[in-house]
Image: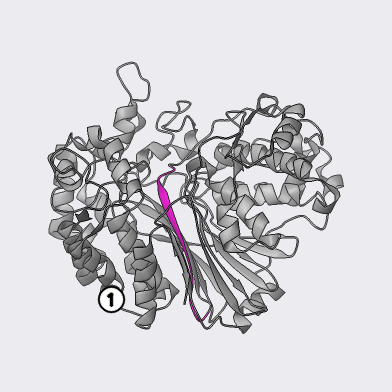
Amino acid sequence: MKHHGFFLIAALLASPCLATQATPTTAADAAVQAARPGKAAIASSHHLATEAGFEILGKGGNAFDAAIAVGATLAVIEPQSSGIGGGGFFLLHRASNGKDFFVDARERAPAQSRGELWADAQGKLDKDKSINGPLSAGIPGEPAAYALLAARYGSLPLSVSLAPAIRIAREGFAVYPRLQSSIERRKPVLERWPASASLYLADGKAPAVGVVWKNPDIADTLERIAREGNDGFYKGEFAKRMVAAVRAAGGIWSREDLADYTVKEREPISLDYRGWRIVTAPPPSSGGIALGEMFNIIAGYDPDRYDRVQRIHFNIEAMRRAYRDRAEYLGDPDYVSMPLAELLSPLYAAGLRASIHPQKATPSDMLPGYMSPTESEHTTHYSIIDADGNMASVTKTVNLTLGSGFVVEGTGFVLNNEMDDFALLPGQPNAFGLVGGDANAPKPGHRPLSSMTPSFVIGKDRVGVIGTPGGSRIITMVFEGILAFIDGELPQQVVGNPRYHHQYLPDVVSAEPDAFTAEETRALQAMGHIVNAGERRWGLMNMVGWDRQSNTLHAGADPREEMSSGKVQ
């Protein structure tokens, strides 16, 4: 365990307002259990998915059944971002007993994984191997997650919850711009494999916007899962067919890899920030730990004492330090021993805060060195509150756009390329320019570190369900979104706010258009920050909220995507 200079004078700077791991039951928890909304709210990246969720609620399902319906529908209509060839995280709240649950459906490394498989002749990371084709694919977790949700949390059979997705796959849906452009972008990779080209290309081109696109193969696959549960995907003839195709194309899957896959139910991370309880993702997500560090750091500053520029400065410095730690210590909790209590300690945060100059940026190269990670931007998130107050915050992915680009003939879905989220070769950057160490190495059965950060924010009178895609920017987006919600903003305003981001390296503040005024940019630059103002927009945040004082629900769908849909009914 490394101990940095940050711990100096930590005990002196610790304050009672600092965030800590919350006790299991708080006054806010009791309020959540005491009331029910009477209506439901769903926000997702496509209106058909949102409608599928409400369809299942209308059949007597709860938020967890709706989470299956929304997720499976997105697997059909948003294959560029997620699908049953990938995985994800499911943060759940059960209203009947006030308990929170975290379902880890992250992909696993095949048993034959070893770093040199992804090296070129010079021993460098071969980018093509790490992001394209079946060698880049981990063992999918999403089908197992749906089977578990239906069996343990839902109130309807899996076949009912999967029915909307199966119907949409057979009847078809209109191709929309983001899907069309994603297929066009990955066309050179899709063309390598006949099954991929057959599924996603028409006469060698991406399908035109507005064309009705049907996918009977994925309908068949979902029906098999509906009938047979886990065994319909991970065992038997279907599994045998997938393994044969993967290995014939250069991959390393085995039937044992599939048969041995299980989702993990983990204890969520629970934090307290100024009287608000934040429930969020534990490892193998790095998001919850990073959020905890950031909130612990800024909790030591009274926001009423500072202007907006000063608060942004403190937020950026908190981001910088949390991202420095993010991959230094974190990995798959089933295999890696991590100093989580230390990282979430108010004393540790106080030491980090002591290194922040109130008027000057800290150059990242002045902090202790590390090796760092990332995650794809091509992910999806949806948020649900049902009429009883059950909640689901779900983030799932296939990693890069259309994952590995590899389709097993007749299955109807693309395999992920999550192996690139491992530190395949220590010290060498992955697709996002970030690197990692041994804690996130591609060892057999391990799950790669993730940025996905599905979260709940629970106050005395208001509750929010939040999350987003956005690659390494996911954590800072959720951080900023939670702060905005705590400040009183409604979900639609929260998800539409312009965003900024810092991740330690590169030592640059990325900012969407209008995130800062020209004056604010100059002020931050005067402090020593390198500000890239006016970058492209990022993320696709979806949030729902419940105001328990007025007993009203709100749904916010990110305006950055025209197909996004937030609805209350």
- Whether residue 122 is situated above or below residue 437 in the rendered picture: above
Q: Is 338 in front, or is 473?
A: 473
**Relative to 401, 408 lies left or right:** left
Q: How many marks?
A: 1
Judge whether 516 appears above or below 341 on screen: above
Residue drawn at (76%, 52%) of the image: 299
Residue 367: image quadrant is top right
Residue, x 24% and y 65% (percent of image)?
168
Q: Which segment did they paint magenta?
A: 377-388
Q: Residues within 10 Å of mark 1 (few under 14, many from 20)?
A: some
Q: Is residue 384 magenta?
A: yes
Whether residue 194 sits left or right of residue 350 in the image: it is: left
508, above or below 20, in the image:
above
Determine which residue is flagged by label 1: 160
- Residue 267: where, in percent of width, then height? 53, 62
Which residue is depicted at the point 70% across and 29% down? Answer: 529
Question: Which of the image's four quarters has the N terminus?
Answer: top right
Instruction: Assign a secondary structure to mark 1.
Output: helix
As drawn, the residue found furthest toward the front would be 210
The residue type indicated by label 1 comes to Val
Quarter where residue 206 is shown:
top left
| In the image: residue 339, left or right of residue 349 | left
- Residue 172 x %, y %: 21, 61
Q: Residue 145: in sight, yes or no?
A: no
Question: Residue shown at 52%/83% (left/top)?
Answer: 38
**Residue 423 appearing in the image:** yes
From this view, report whether residue 265 is shown above or below residue 127: below
Please give left or right for residue 498 compared with residue 566 in the image. right
Rendering coords of residue 558 (x, y %)? 49, 55
Is 117 in the magenta? no
Residue 349 appears at what percent x and percent y? 73, 46
